[in-house]
Image (cartoon, grey):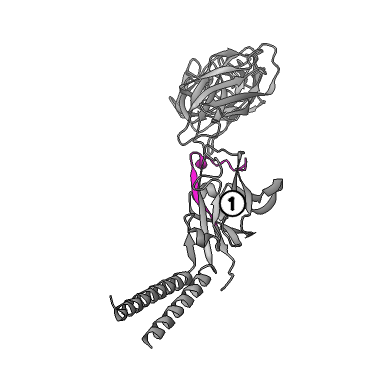
Amino acid sequence: MRARGTAGLLLAALAACSLAVGFSVASFTDTTQNPQTITAVTDFLAPGAGASAIGKAEGGAAGYVRAGGSYRVYANVTDSGNPSSKTSSVKANLSALTAGQTAAALTSGTYSFGGVAYNYRSAQLKVDSGVGAGTKSYALTLVDGAGNSRVQNFTVAVDNGPFAGSSFATANGSGNDSGEPEEGDAVAFTYNDVPEAETVKSGWDGEAESVKVSIADSSGTETLSVSGVNLGSVSLKGDYVDSGKTVSFSGSSMTLSGSTVTIVLGAPSSTSNLNDDNASRAPVWAPSSAADDRAGNACSTATVTGASTRQF
Amino acid sequence: MDRLSIVFHSRRWLLLAALALLSLALGSAIFSGASFTSKSANSASLATASIQLSSSAANQAIVAASGMRPGDTRQGTIAIANKGGAAGTVVLKASGLSGSALAAVIDLKVEDVTGGGAAHKWSGKLGSFGSVDLGSFASGVSREYRLTLSWPAASNDAALQGASTSLTFQWHGTAKGEGA
């Protein structure tokens, strides 16, 4: 009896084992895997020139040159990266200005032109004498240490003049007597192009600048001049100061707006020496050749006659 | 030893054998009730009745993808075979993604190139890849897959310079239930 029970247990165990093995193949899984990493090169972008300009050798405003004038190319070049491979070369194709200069090298350093900081600059070059006026293109080729390169185009204006005065006028200040130069009255010198402020007065940027205006007797055709300023002189063709006298207006304020230099007269050195001249007068302005336009063209000394009207 | 003693000892061994078999059966049943995961070291007897994946490049990168840059395309192929005795389905999955910025830019394409064809299986941004069902693998079948990684040239954000992304491709095979 006991042997029969043991045999039964054995059979049950064998059956259970078979069943278990049968189930074990029912949902069998297997996995194999591949780790995958993708990496980017540390510098795949070419350098970029955030700014570039051509500046004439005389300094002043950037972006204007003249035939025969000397210039340099300036650029602000940066190269991104993580880390950057750094800018390796900056070359300029300036063939539109200077024949043969298809790859003028710019060297790194700390430079400034027209109030803007740059970190690359070319050697001084010269605009060919036959280059006509107009907008010219030049290209910078920028290469970094990883071999990434880019070409960026910029423009420069060639202005061959002529640069000259175009008009002169006076204006009566608010509440002032007409016909007599007084504090608050103004004189305006207008050119046919924007003058280079630096050449009108050394160190001047065109913002309000204190100057001294003088009106000197000249036998009834008084002369107006501005101390230390290359505006030339004006024959006022009228009698505005006493005979043999000169009245100066210190603290006069000079500003540049477009192509016009305007001076608002300050307090006169003497009011008793000032005269009313109520006749119409046509002042004659003799510009100074020391003033240049932005391209470096010197101003013509040809005189300019203002409108015949009561002045000041 | 007398006859009575022999009978007594035989019954005891039979009882012990029966208990051992029962324990084995219970253990097998318990473990097989869960989804059984095995590696390539499956016993021969179980392999004949299960799916067993074999890879031509197990635990290796499928695509050589270091030093990529915008405009680059890299490809790699891998053979996946079912060495088990049972047919099953295979799903390609991704897990453990890191470096999402680059993964959002890289395009992934999965193709079945078995026999020289190129059957599209999945394509899209690497970062959005979750899984793709590769279908049924009969016992003994081997298929070749090509993975293509492309970096669109226009996606040249400077912030991606020096970036990296990693993930694990998992080829997951499940045997078809024969007796369940």
Q: Position of residue A26 (x, y in %)?
A: 55, 69
The C terminus of chain A sits in image quarter:
top right
* Chain at numbered mark 1: B
Q: Residues within 10 Å of mark 1 (few under 14, many from 20)?
A: many
Comparing B5 with A36, the one in front is: B5
**A33 over A140 or under it: above or below:** below
Q: Position of residue A77 (x, y in %)?
A: 52, 28
Could you tell me which residue is drawn at 62 percent across and 43 percent down? B152
Q: Quadrant of the N terminus of chain A?
A: bottom left
The question of residue B164 being in magenta is answered with yes
Q: Residue at left 41%, top 73%?
A: B21
Image location (x, y in percent) of residue A224: 54, 20
The quarter of the picture where residue A188 lies is top right
The segment highlighted magenta reads: B151-171
Q: Which residue, given by chain and number where applicable, does mark 1 sit on?
A: B80
In the displayed structure, A31 sits above or below B149; it is: below
Tell me, yes or no, whether the highlighted magenta stretch contains residue B85.
Answer: no
